[in-house]
Image: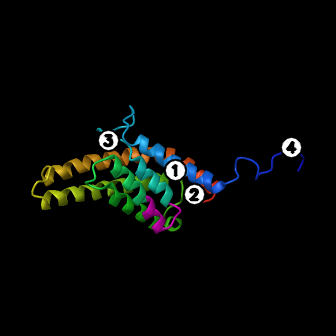
Amino acid sequence: MTVGTPSRKQSGLRHPLVVNTGVTVASVLVCLMLLPSRIPGMELLGVGPHWLLIWVVAWSVKRTMWQGALAGLVLGLLQDAMTAPHPTHTLSLIVVGVLTARLQKQRYLQEDIISVALIVFAMAVIAETVLALQISLDYLFSADSLYPTLSKIWLYHQRVALSSAILSSLWAPALYYPLNRWWDRHGTEP
């Protein structure tokens, strides 16, 4: 090494764990900011992409069931902090994290953008179904429920689940590809 040439330790990549954590946290913050936004062309029947669900799928694809569950827990709590606490999004995102991690992708699906889009589509339907179940249970067991009848809940669920699944699966590659490349290049753990 010549004098005046910075070594790798002297450059800005002194702490790769800090940089990886920063990129991971920044990606979550971007998803949180995109979640309530309704940018023209990014909504269908009043429903936008479920950015946090896409992030949980991208995270859980190459991780263990527990890491997927933890990601779902944290992002679900963040989403619940932005919205009403009932129904909770935490339960649905935990289910998404666990199911995505439990898919044995090496046996059933290749890890490519099409497969991830299909996983996101299925997980969006599952997540919306978990939310509809929570609303239905509140309607059945709460004397002062603010929700409509069960038939209206499930009719609305069909529309929201399909819209969310379509949009989320279409936008999944935009989030999955850069994050997956970053995590592959700079270590799988933030």
- Between residue 52 and residue 6, name the one nearer to us: 6
Indicate the position of residue 178 as horizontal and vertical percent values: 57, 47
In which quarter of the view is residue 128 placed?
bottom left
User: Which circle marks residue 25 in the picture?
Assistant: 1
Between discs 3 and 4, the one toward the N terminus: 4
Q: Amino acid at mark 3?
A: Val
Q: Which residue is mark 2?
A: 190
- Mark 1 residue element: helix
Q: Residue at x 53, y 60 (%)?
A: 110
Disc 2 versus disc 4: nearer the observer:
4
Q: Would you say the residues marked 2 and 4 are in contact, meaning their CB atoms lie under 8 Å apart?
A: no
Between discs 2 and 4, the one toward the N terminus: 4
Is 50 on the left-hand or right-hand side of 144? right
Q: Residue at x 63, y 59 (%)?
A: 187
Specify whether residue 44 is in view.
yes
Bounds of the magenta span? 61-71
Q: Amino acid at mark 4?
A: Gly
Q: Which residue is mark 3?
A: 47
User: Which circle marks residue 4 in the picture?
Assistant: 4
Q: Would you say the residues marked 1 and 2 are in contact, meaning their CB atoms lie under 8 Å apart?
A: yes
Which quadrant is the C terminus positioned in?
A: bottom right
